[in-house]
Image (cartoon, grey):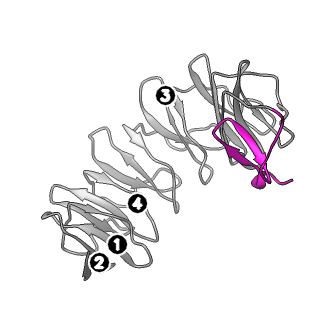
Amino acid sequence: MHWKEIQLTDNNHFTYNGCMLFDKKFIQALKFHEPGFAPVHDKTGWYHIDIQGMPFYTKRYECVFGYYAMRASVIEHGMWFHIDKHGKRVYSQNYAFTGNFQKGRCVVRNEHGYYFHIDLHGERVYQENYRYVGDYKDGYACVQLLSGKFKHIDMHGKFIYIAEFDDLGVFHKNFATAKDERGWFHIDEYGKQCYEMCYNMIEPFYNGQARVQRHDSTFLLIDETGMEIRQL
């Protein structure tokens, strides 16, 4: 039985080929993640189980989350940190929030309310503090500056362009959604707008096309040059 074949049912127990596993229902459970561990909650607290349904550490937490890059976020006494695949703390620092590792980077928030990214060893990737940061995707992450504006940074925390925006989305297939006082549009990796029009709403490009909404509330499809393909 491979962990990918185990299904979470009713958010409180696991099944395989339609049969209940481990002869147990939990108060709450989350899906199995690589390397084959699942977060569960019973009367003893939160912890992780293996594909045999057995806890692989004795510790209990206020809450635990799924494994990403062999790291899992846990909460103990209101403080957040990561444990490794052996159930051991990865670093000594406590945070007010920890996200999930993506591409060797993870979002955290410190006790002062500032966001930044840490690496797999728990070390800060850069020294800047932000109002908010998002997960890395395709090598870039969105950050909200202390001024309230948004930019993208690279894997080392360096800005990839000079421009600042009122809001941003992640890069997807070389384009990101961006917003200024005129509305939404798409930008390239240099922070340049891909076309002249601005919209009330836009989606990321999907195979070269994106659904957008004009300011008059009509919807249409555009290509990567901004050319209108059809009205919806």
Mark 1 to mark 3 CA distance (whole Å): 37 Å
Mark 2 to mark 1 CA distance (whole Å): 6 Å
Determine which residue is flagged by label 2.
222
Residue type indicated by callout 2: Ile
Tell me the crowding category of disc 4: few under 14, some 14 to 19, or many 20 or more residues within 10 angstroms, Cα based. Answer: some
Determine whether label 2 and label 1 are within 8 Å by CB: yes
Is residue 227 depicted above or below 103 in this figure? Answer: below
Number of the label disc, if any, that sits on residue 110: 3
Number of the label disc, if any, that sits on residue 176: none
Image location of residue 4, percent across then percent down: 75, 55
Looking at the image, is mark 2 or mark 4 earlier in the sequence? 4
Looking at the image, is mark 4 or mark 1 earlier in the sequence? 4
* Magenta region includes residue 132: no
Dividing the image into 4 quarters, which one contains the C terminus?
A: bottom left
Determine which residue is flagged by label 1.
210
From the image, state whether disc 2 or disc 3 is nearer to you.
2
The magenta region covers 1-23
Mark 3 to mark 4 CA distance (whole Å): 25 Å
Looking at the image, is mark 2 or mark 1 earlier in the sequence? 1
Mark 4 to mark 1 CA distance (whole Å): 24 Å
